[in-house]
Amino acid sequence: MNKSPFLESVRIELRTRRYSLKTEKAYLHWIKRFILFNDKRHPEGMGNVEIERFLNHLACNRLVSAATQNLALCAIIFLYRYKKLKV
């Protein structure tokens, strides 16, 4: 199975910062879903509008709980904070 070099770099960052494996899996899941939701665009080319749209989609269309929506947000925050991407 081919793994995305970008997602692998996120995985390495999570491990370097000693996040638990459960958190690593959850964050990678939500980051991947965020990218897929936005037509496989690189996060560097996305910003607040795309993030807000994704979170609204989760709440309104997927009917996820507030805790799940918050987990997705935390994963996206990690992505932009530690991968040094600009929003």
Image (cartoon, rainbow, N blue to C red):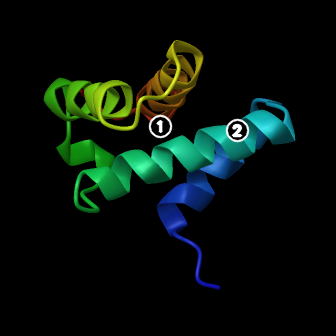
Q: Position of residue 52 (x, y in %)?
A: 24, 24
Label 2 and label 1: CA atoms lie apart by 10 Å
Residue at (28%, 34%) from the top-left corner? 57
Tell how many labels. Answer: 2
On the image, numbered disc 2 is attached to which residue? 14
Is 70 left, or right, of 40 in this rendering?
right
State the residue in front, 57 or 14: 57
Spot occupied by residue 28 in the image (x, y as percentages of width and height): 60, 47
Left or right placement of residue 41 versus residue 68 in this view: left
Above or below, 33 relative to 17: below
Q: Quadrant of the N terminus?
A: bottom right
Q: Of label 2 and label 1, which has the lower sequence position?
A: 2
Q: Residue at x 48, y 28 (%)?
A: 64
Residue located at (59% from left, 74% from top): 3
Q: Disc 2 marks which amino acid?
A: Leu
Does any portion of residue 55 appear in the rendered image? yes
Visible in this render: residue 16?
no
| Vertical placement of residue 22 versus 49, above or below | below
Tell me the quarter of the image containing the C terminus: top left
Tag of residue 2: none
Disc 1 is placed on an element classified as loop
Instruction: Find numbered disc 2 in the image and state the secondary structure of the residue it sits on.
Output: helix
Would residue 70 be found to the left or right of residue 54 on screen? right
Residue where numbered disc 1 is placed: 83
Question: At label 1, which amino acid type do we have?
Answer: Lys
Question: In this view of the protein, which residue sits in the foreground, 76 or 10?
Answer: 76
The crowd level at tag 1 (other Cα within 10 Å; few <14, some 14-19, many 20+) is: some
Who's the residue at 58% across and 48% down the image? 29
**Which quadrant would residue 49 be assigned to in this image?**
top left
